[in-house]
């Protein structure tokens, strides 16, 4: 913080018409009218500078104003704000304490001091301030809410209830107060009092069916299912076609393991015209997610989607959710039909197009992936990820000129600040050059990728693995793949690459450990990893186990001639 130069302050004083003789007329320690006027002017100048965001100068002038008039509350308040911004809590507290002592009934000075005290762990001081402020500010119920929350956080539950009771007396029975009292009673293990609070809310608003649903949900959450059912029945008697009642009862029936009843409640909720779309979507997501986790039959989901899409044909999120489910079920054609609707409804959403392209890439529909990417690019010509996906499709078709052109366009479209995107693009370019057999260009592209973003695990893995295949720069390969493994220690691909680099370096025992880890972390049906593990077993004199592993590798893929010879001769043979 710089200091205001003396000539600056002198200029202010001269402009006001004050001479140095004014100081001589003041008694030491006594605030004069002259000091008060000077302090006020200096403070106003500080406010002007603060509004211009000249904060250093404003801070210094606030200090000057308080030096002249230590009771200038506005300057003290602003000075406290500056100190708080500098993490100088003690100094900020002192300023606010002084301001509050001068104006003990001022809401802002006291409430700011209370919040700052609370942040500094001075809980009792904060409580004392709020207790003093509440009767002075009957129009500010938020003070009582804050005080009650402080009591709850510090375990003073009886005091919290007193606050809420006072609020209820002043404001009447309200949901926000009732629910806070309910929670406090539960924390005190007084369930009877807790549920009585909601019953009181129902009594105050007998026509509000949602409070009955709230009571039923609360009973259900507490495992009191008979009472929950009774409350749901009360709600149904009051409003039998309430969509939110169906949604709540769906969860209730799930808890008591009545799957058919739960499904029916979900259906009734989804087709109910009075439920908002967001609630329906949340209910549907919960139903689908729970069914997938429980490996439940999903045939009924098609019926539900048909019903809800008939009612909401233009809601993109329902079509997207259906596409996601169909994709999980490996119903690719139907998933594509839904994604076609999705991108038609929201053609400017890049993620929808990327999912559509990726779905086609995943089942080797490369020409279709290119068509979808080209359509997406018409709407989103500046989206580099689309060019990357399109390049992947072209490279899988061995159309490398087009693949390279697509990548280079993606690079041109990428903001230089988007270093991770640039790294991915150059990484794909490196993969492509390797696929074309041009390792030098591949390694050059990988180097560029890592210059943009040196934590690109995919590039670190691929670069390392391809070097290991050439037995080239193995120390560098080990350093790169070790970084990838540290970032994702359970990734079987990275563990396999690390094991294979160690194998190529002749460190067979350690290689065996990492290759076994790769198999244990999901690569137990990967023929390449299994063959690598067999090679490491052979090199560590576990030859019978090595042959078994080679045989297992042959079961999960089309065995190479080298693998066939290993199995036939029961000897390790190096790939050429």
Image (cartoon, rainbow, N blue to C red):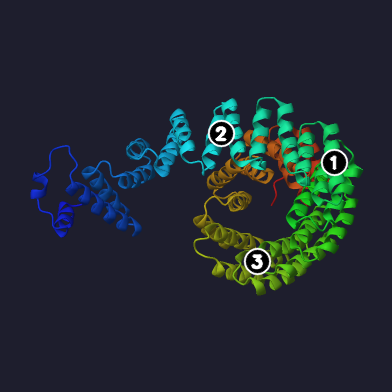
Give x and y (percent) for residue 218: 75, 36
Q: Residues within 10 Å of mark 1 (few under 14, many from 20)?
A: some
Horizontal arrangement in the rendering, residue 124 relative to residue 392 (left or right): left
Q: Residue at x 18, y 56 (%)?
A: 12
Q: CA distance from mark 1 to mark 2?
A: 33 Å
Give x and y (percent) for residue 471: 60, 49
Write down the residue under mark 3. Answer: 386
Q: Residue at x 82, y 60 (%)?
A: 332
Horizontal arrangement in the rendering, residue 251 relative to residue 116 (left or right): right
Q: Residues within 10 Å of mark 3 (few under 14, many from 20)?
A: many
Q: Against 383, is 293 above or below?
A: above
Q: Earlier in the sequence, mark 3 or mark 1?
A: 1
Q: Against 554, is 50 above or below?
A: below
Horizontal arrangement in the rendering, residue 176 relative to residue 95 (left or right): right
Q: Earlier in the sequence, mark 1 or mark 2?
A: 2
Q: Against 231, is 265 above or below?
A: below
Viewer-nearest of discs 3 and 1: 1
Q: CA distance from mark 3 to mark 2?
A: 53 Å
146 or 144: nearer the eye? 144
Q: Against 98, is 428 above or below?
A: below
Write down the residue under mark 1. Answer: 234
Viewer-nearest of discs 3 and 2: 2
Q: Secondary structure at mark 1?
A: helix
538 or 115: nearer the eye? 115
Q: Secondary structure at mark 3?
A: helix
Write down the residue under mark 2. Answer: 148
113 or 247: nearer the eye? 113
Horizontal arrangement in the rendering, residue 26 relative to residue 224 (left or right): left
Q: Residue at x 80, y 31 (%)?
A: 223
Let me know if residue 567 appears in the view: no
Give x and y (percent) for residue 386: 65, 66
């Amino acid at each position: 913080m710089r200091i205001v130069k003396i000539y600056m302050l002198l200029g202010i004083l001269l402009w006001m018409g004050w001479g140095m003789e004014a100081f001589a007329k003041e008694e030491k320690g006594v605030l004069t009218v002259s000091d008060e006027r000077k302090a006020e002017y200096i403070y106003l100048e500080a406010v002007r500078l603060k509004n211009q965001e000249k904060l250093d100068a404003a801070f210094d002038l606030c200090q000057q104003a308080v030096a002249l008039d230590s009771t200038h509350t506005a300057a003290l308040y602003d000075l406290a704000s500056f100190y708080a911004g500098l993490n100088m809590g003690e100094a900020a507290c002192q300023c606010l304490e002084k301001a509050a002592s001068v104006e003990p009934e001022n809401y802002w000075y006291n409430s700011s001091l209370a919040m700052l005290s609370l942040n500094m762990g001075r809980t009792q001081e904060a409580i004392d301030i709020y207790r003093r402020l509440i009767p002075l500010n009957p129009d500010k119920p938020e003070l009582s809410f804050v005080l009650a929350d402080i009591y709850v956080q510090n375990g003073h539950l009886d005091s919290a209830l007193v606050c809420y009771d006072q609020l209820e007396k002043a404001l009447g029975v309200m949901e926000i107060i009732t629910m806070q009292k309910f929670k406090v009673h539960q924390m005190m293990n007084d369930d009877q009092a807790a549920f009585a609070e909601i019953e009181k809310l129902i009594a105050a608003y007998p026509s509000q069916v949602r409070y009955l649903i709230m009571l039923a949900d609360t009973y259900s959450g507490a495992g009191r299912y008979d009472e929950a059912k009774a409350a749901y029945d009360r709600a149904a008697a009051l409003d039998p076609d309430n969509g939110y009642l169906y949604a709540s009862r769906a969860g209730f029936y799930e808890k008591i393991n009545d799957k058919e009843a739960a499904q029916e409640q979900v259906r009734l909720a989804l087709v109910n015209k009075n439920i908002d779309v967001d609630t329906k979507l949340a209910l549907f997501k919960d139903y689908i997610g729970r069914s997938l986790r429980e490996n439940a039959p999903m045939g009924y989901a098609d019926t539900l989607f048909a019903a809800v899409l008939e009612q909401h044909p233009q809601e993109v999120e329902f079509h997207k959710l259906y596409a996601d489910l169909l994709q999980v079920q490996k119903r690719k054609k139907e998933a594509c039909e839904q994604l076609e609707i999705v991108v038609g409804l929201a053609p400017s959403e890049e993620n929808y197009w990327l999912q559509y392209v990726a779905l086609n890439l995943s089942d080797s529909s490369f020409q279709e992936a290119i068509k979808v990417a080209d359509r997406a690019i018409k709407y989103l010509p500046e989206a580099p990820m689309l060019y990357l996906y399109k390049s992947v499709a072209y490279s899988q078709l061995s159309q490398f000129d087009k693949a390279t052109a697509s990548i280079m366009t993606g690079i041109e479209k990428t903001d230089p600040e988007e270093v991770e995107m640039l790294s991915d693009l150059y990484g794909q370019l490196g993969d492509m050059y390797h696929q074309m057999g041009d390792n030098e260009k591949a390694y050059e592209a990988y180097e560029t990728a890592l210059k943009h973003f040196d934590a690109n695990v995919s590039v670190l893995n691929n670069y390392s693995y391809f070097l290991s295949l050439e037995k080239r720069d193995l120390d560098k390969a080990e350093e790169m793949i070790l970084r990838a493994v540290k970032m994702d220690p359970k990734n079987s691909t990275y563990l396999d690459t690390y094991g294979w680099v160690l194998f190529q370096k002749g460190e067979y025992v350690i290689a065996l450990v990492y290759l076994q880890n790769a198999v244990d972390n999901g690569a137990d049906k990967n023929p390449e990893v299994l063959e690598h593990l067999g090679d490491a077993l052979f090199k560590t004199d576990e030859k019978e186990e090595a042959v078994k592993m080679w045989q297992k590798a042959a079961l999960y893929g089309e065995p190479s001639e080298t693998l066939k010879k290993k199995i036939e001769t029961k000897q390790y043979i190096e790939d050429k």
